[in-house]
Amino acid sequence: MDTVYENALRDMDMKIYRNCLLYNGDIPFAVGSLDGTYTLSGKGQWTDGFWPGLQLLAYAGLQDDLLLGEYERYMPFLIERVNNDPTVNKDRGYLSLDHDVGFIFHLTAVYHYVLTGSQSSREIGLKAAESLLGRFQEKGSYIRAWNNWESDTPEFRQEKKGKAIIDSLMNVPLLFWAAKETGESRYRKSAEAHIRQLATNIVREDGSTYHSYNFNPDTGNPVGGRSVQGYSHASTWSRGQAWAIYGFALAYRYTGNEEFLQASQRCLNYWKHSLLPEGDAPWDFAAPRNKWLPIDTSAMSIASCGILELYLHAPDDRELHELAERMISRLLEAHRAPAFPAGNAFLLHGCVGPAYREGSKEEKDRNYFYANQSLIYGDYFLYEAIMRLQSRNTLLPWDF
């Protein structure tokens, strides 16, 4: 099996090299096509960190300075991005920074700083951490999720004032790094308080999760769970469940808090008993299981990383390692994109969601608008998962 993973990693390495030439300093849109191709330019989104981050992951494993040089072409863009200038954002069509700064800058600037000692990257990372810390709401002890978008209804704009989302668990490692780097406890305290709120409110009794959770923005009191990307407000969006498995496991790494470890384990227990018979993750675990049901390979790759993170803390639990291997093998056997140049993605069959909504009369017409796509974050976490299996003896972004 090691040979299978090594061959898969080698194939992905070659795609990374070739994509460096193809992208030529640009960033692909996060959502690719049915056949596994990405288009340019996708700059200015919450996903800005995944392609440069892939270059750094490959550099960390291969120690090829060519990859490092390709990554460093993105540093001026990352400086521009972290400055978050409203005029620049408007002129260039960038989203203003929100809770997803960890995805953008922890996988890039912070990782680059640790690998190379770049002080410029350190400054970018600390500025990003300050931005994330600024979203912490003292009333309620949570990190506010999204900013306002032009397409928002007045009701959704009001709801956003008190909204936290499950994805944020993968962004708070930026705060733990900043606390360690600066010695300032405010970063760590806010991160831990936010994670406790999610463990208490966003994880249900059976180990399933809400996509988001609303608090009263004036009092901080809990209001209730909601979903934006899932099937219904009471359902379980699989990528959110994967973020929870991985995010709570990482939170345990940084804090040693058993409550966070137990939250990850509960989320994993729900996950492994909810997969489709062939081992795939449906887009939403509550969506109707009929021929129209899309799957989400990005959720599977993220969850695989989370399971392997849990395995680090329970090395005698071979079931964890075997579960991760089965999921990764399923991805490689059933969901790989075509070889370059037919496909520059690693995976097919991702689903952004919602593929369809509960009660929708247009399920079949809308289904493939959001489903069966390559997703750059699915690619990123598949590469990371196989690196973990292969033990390339290198630092990952979460190792500091």
Image (spheres, grey):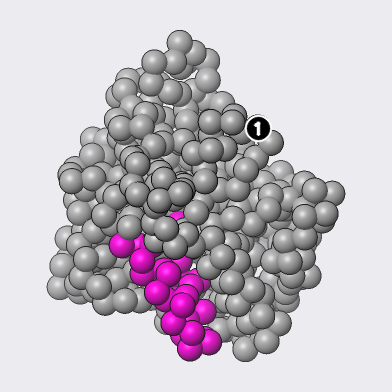
Q: Which residue does the numbered mark 1 point to in the structure image?
A: 151
Q: Residue furthest top?
A: 361
Quadrant containing the C terminus in the rendered view: bottom left
Q: Residue furthest front?
A: 219
Quadrant containing the N terminus in the rendered view: bottom left
- Nearer the observer, 91 or 286: 91
Q: Secondary structure at mark 1?
A: loop
State the residue at coordinates (82%, 56%): 88
Instruction: Indicate the position of residue 357 as horizontal and vertical percent values.
Output: 43, 23
Does the stretch in magenta take in 178? yes
In the rendered image, is residue 378 in sight?
no
Question: Mark 1 Cα within 10 Å, few/some/many (few <14, many 20+)?
Answer: few
Q: Is residue 259 left or right of residue 392?
A: left
Q: Compared with residue 98, is residue 251 higher up or lower down, i.e. above or below?
A: below
User: For the image shown, how many numbered marks are present on the structure?
Assistant: 1
Q: Disc 1 residue type?
A: Ser
In the rendered image, is residue 218 in sight?
yes
Q: Is residue 226 left or right of residue 313?
A: right
State the residue at coordinates (38%, 29%): 231
- Nearer the observer, 88 or 63: 88
Q: Which residues are magenta?
A: 168-196
Q: Compared with residue 316, is residue 120 higher up or lower down, i.e. above or below?
A: below
Instruction: Indicate the position of residue 311 as horizontal and vertical percent values.
Output: 25, 68
Instruction: Indicate the position of residue 394 as horizontal and vertical percent values.
Output: 46, 80
State the residue at coordinates (62%, 86%): 116
Name the chief secondary structure element in magenta: helix
- Nearer the observer, 200 or 219: 219
Q: Is residue 211 left or right of residue 201?
A: right
Q: Quadrant of residue 237?
A: top left
